Image (cartoon, helix red, strand yellow):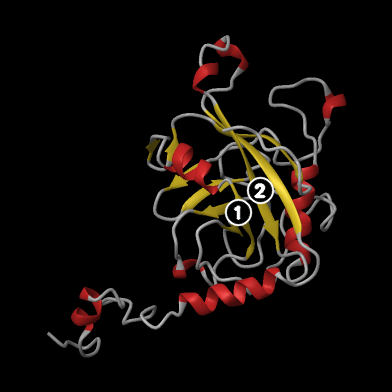
């Protein structure tokens, strides 16, 4: 039927060009053109890379290493669009280079009150969107905080930068902000080929250039979730600036 929402919505829906409620909002989305625009953004300035060493499986010290054989570790390399999004990339880079103390540690000499991505876990795995990391305060996804060098020690977030990168490729890395101009430390690694509903909502600032297969095989497909929460630890055990030619961590 035609209805009040326009003519031919069902035909568009069946041909994967939108639906009754979308009214064909994405049917004319030129993904190849968006990908070429993304390439132009990443080509600006000198390339910068960071890495995340991610372990999948139980890594708690109180398990007497009984799950050590089940643990898998892989190094994910991310390219940053620092020339186009300097503040967002500087925040992510600073949190990667920070050396916070391990959880439940009483030794402040190992990092003190410094915040960073080291020792944090994935708090959400949405297998139709992406993997969420980056809660540097409570490690459960309810909060986050930007690096003090971005604004001030008392500030938890910073404003949005221009949304110049489209979520049109698997592996795009975006700030997972709860609202407009409230970016903190939480971020999302996109695992689907195209996510147009994220455009205009989250600021994308990087992309995975190495070891995306490790995330897809061992995290997306290999980790059982309960309402999006992983049932095993998906933890960042190492991170920092990546220099080309560095050895990879074996998966």
Q: Does any portion of residue 162 appear in the rendered image? A: no
Q: Does any portion of residue 24 appear in the rendered image? A: yes
Could you say whether the residue bearing mark 1 is in a helix, strand or loop?
A: strand
Q: Nearer the viewer, residue 12 or 145?
A: 12
Please indicate whether residue 12 sits to the left or right of residue 51 in the image: left
Could you tell me if the residues under marks 1 and 2 are in contact, i.e. CB atoms within 8 Å? yes
Q: Nearer the viewer, residue 210 or 38?
A: 210
Q: Residue furthest left?
A: 1
Q: Residues within 10 Å of mark 2 (few under 14, many from 20)?
A: many
Please indicate whether residue 133 sits to the left or right of residue 15 in the image: right
Q: Residue at x 56, y 53 (%)?
A: 188
Q: Nearer the viewer, residue 249 or 66?
A: 249
Q: Residue at x 69, y 68 (%)?
A: 42
Upstream in sequence: badge 1 or badge 2: 2
Q: Residues within 10 Å of mark 1 (few under 14, many from 20)?
A: many
- The numbered dot on residue 77 is 2
Q: Quadrant of residue 85?
A: bottom right
- Position in image of residue 161 (x %, y %): 70, 70
Q: Nearer the viewer, residue 214 or 86?
A: 214
- Position in image of residue 176 (x %, y %): 58, 56
Q: Which residue is mark 1?
A: 208
Q: Quadrant of residue 17?
A: bottom left
The quadrant of the image that shows the C terminus is top right
Please indicate whether residue 114 sits to the left or right of residue 13 in the image: right
Could you say whether the residue bearing mark 2 is in a helix, strand or loop?
A: strand
Q: Residue furthest front?
A: 245
């Amino acid at each position: 039927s035609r209805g009040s929402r326009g003519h031919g919505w069902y035909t568009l829906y069946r041909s994967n060009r939108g639906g009754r409620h979308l009214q064909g909002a994405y049917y004319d989305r030129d993904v190849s053109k968006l990908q070429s625009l993304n390439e132009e953004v990443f080509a600006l300035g000198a390339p910068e890379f960071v890495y995340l060493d991610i372990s999948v499986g139980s890594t708690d010290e109180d398990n007497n290493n009984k799950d050590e054989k089940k643990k898998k570790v892989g190094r994910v390399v991310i390219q940053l669009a620092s020339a186009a999004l300097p503040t967002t990339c500087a925040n992510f880079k600073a949190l990667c280079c920070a050396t916070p103390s391990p959880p439940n540690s009483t030794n402040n000499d190992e990092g003190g009150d410094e915040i960073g991505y080291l020792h944090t876990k994935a708090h959400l795995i949405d297998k139709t969107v992406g993997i969420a990391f980056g809660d540097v305060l409570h490690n459960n996804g309810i909060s986050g905080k930007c690096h003090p060098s971005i604004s001030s020690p008392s500030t938890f977030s910073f404003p949005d930068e221009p949304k110049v990168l489209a979520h049109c490729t698997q592996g795009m890395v975006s700030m997972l902000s709860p609202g407009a101009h409230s970016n903190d430390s939480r971020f999302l690694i996109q695992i689907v080929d195209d996510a147009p509903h994220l455009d205009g909502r989250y600021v994308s600032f990087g992309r995975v250039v190495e070891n995306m297969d490790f995330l897809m095989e061992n995290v997306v497909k290999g980790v059982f979730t309960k309402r999006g929460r992983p049932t095993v630890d998906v933890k960042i055990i190492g991170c920092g600036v990546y220099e080309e030619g560095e050895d990879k961590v074996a998966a």
